[in-house]
Amino acid sequence: MSFIETDIDNARKILISNQLNFTGHKKTFNNLLYGIIEKLSYVQIDTISVVERSHHHILWSRMNDYDKRKLDDLLEKDKLIFEYWAHAASYLPMKDYRFSLLRKDAFRKKHKEWGSANRKIIKRVYDRIKSDGPMQSRNFIDKKKPGKGWWDWKPSKDALDFLFHSGKLMVCRRSGFQKVFDITERVLPGNVNSSYPSEKEVFTNLILNSLNANGFSEEREIMYLRKYDRKLFTKVINELKEDKKIIDFKIKEMKDSDYYVQTNRVEDLIPKNMTDELYVLSPFDNLIIDRRKIRNLFGFDFQLECYLPGHKRKFGYFCLPVLYKNKFIGRIDLKADRKSKILFIQNIFFENHHKKSNSFNKILMKKLNLFAGFCGCESVNKLI
């Protein structure tokens, strides 16, 4: 068998089941929260908190009894996850720590001149954290010595960022939403594999992580927003095929599709049962982040408009995609007012194929009431 093929309806089910259905994993994962992050391979962090910050929203969508404090514990106490860069700032499984070393090395080389020009301030920041313990950027307050005419300390946020991205510092915890840094040696657990990986190993890890998280993926999705050697990537793909670890995956309605699946998952790839769940997703959710894939599979053209000037927005500053059963049926513009404890529905836009009904409205309002509680609100201001 050189490839397997299915139709677009089954492909949607495969993606949704892999990305969102974790109800059957409670017995498998001793720690369900960590199991979700490990399965997804990353959870994106973002500063926007119109409703709730993206990493919390992403995890809540898969675990409705999600407790934010448990994520803090995974990072600070259990040290099962760490904060670094996937295609964006993310929480990552600690088991994948070694695969971040290539990017850290590349960052140091790319910013070598800046590092050299600012070596004194970089050393001061690093040495102070090493001697005094974990700190955040606000701890570096400029001090002026009498008669000296200049600053005793002039550390900058850039120095912290440089040390973080180059691997000398890690985030040991968050205080509010502010990073607290410590030297890497004190953050890493003793049993972590920190051996330097080859580029081939990094590609292999990215490929298998993506297939595990999504069920099926193509090259463009796997290497999303990453610079890479395409010849080496092709070589790794071919070797994985030869070793019968992956196999080509075709979607009948998509003639140019060039996806892969893990060979050992072929038999149970298509889920037997799909729940009629409704999801109000974060725009940074792992399922929706690859806009092209969602457009091709679901015919849903989603764009986050907060980065657009106001006059160019069609749907609102922070519209959230709404998934029902195996279709994206619309987007909803929500805002959590934590002073009044009201989740405001500012607008809602349904796709043409969606059929409105009283029963659906009840399902939607039930989900929005749950979401309101998650966002620290007590009620929903209904506009529908």
Image (cartoon, rainbow, N blue to C red):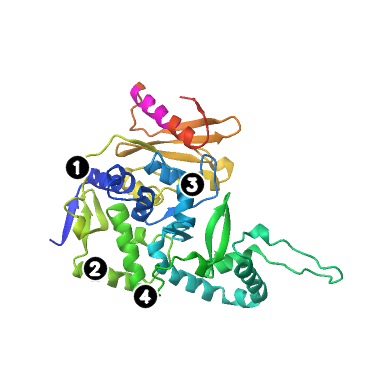
Label located before the other in sequence (2 or 3)? 3
The residue that mark 3 highlights is 69
Image quarter of residue 281 = top left
- Quadrant of residue 92 in the image? bottom left
Name the residue furthest left.
Answer: 1
Q: Which residue was labeled with disc 4?
A: 198
Amino acid on which disc 1 is placed: Lys
Where does residue 204 sit, x and y in percent of width and height?
31, 67
Q: Secondary structure at mark 2?
A: helix
Mark number, residue 272: 1
Residues in magenta, as a range: 359-368
Kindly report the distance in space between the C-alpha atoms of the residues bearing marks 1 and 3: 34 Å
Q: In terms of secondary structure, where does tag 4 sit?
A: loop
The N terminus appears in which quarter of the rendering? Answer: bottom left
Q: Spatial distance from mark 1 to mark 2, Cα to Cα?
A: 28 Å
The secondary structure type at the circle numbered 1 is loop
Q: Nearer the viewer, residue 6 or 172?
A: 172
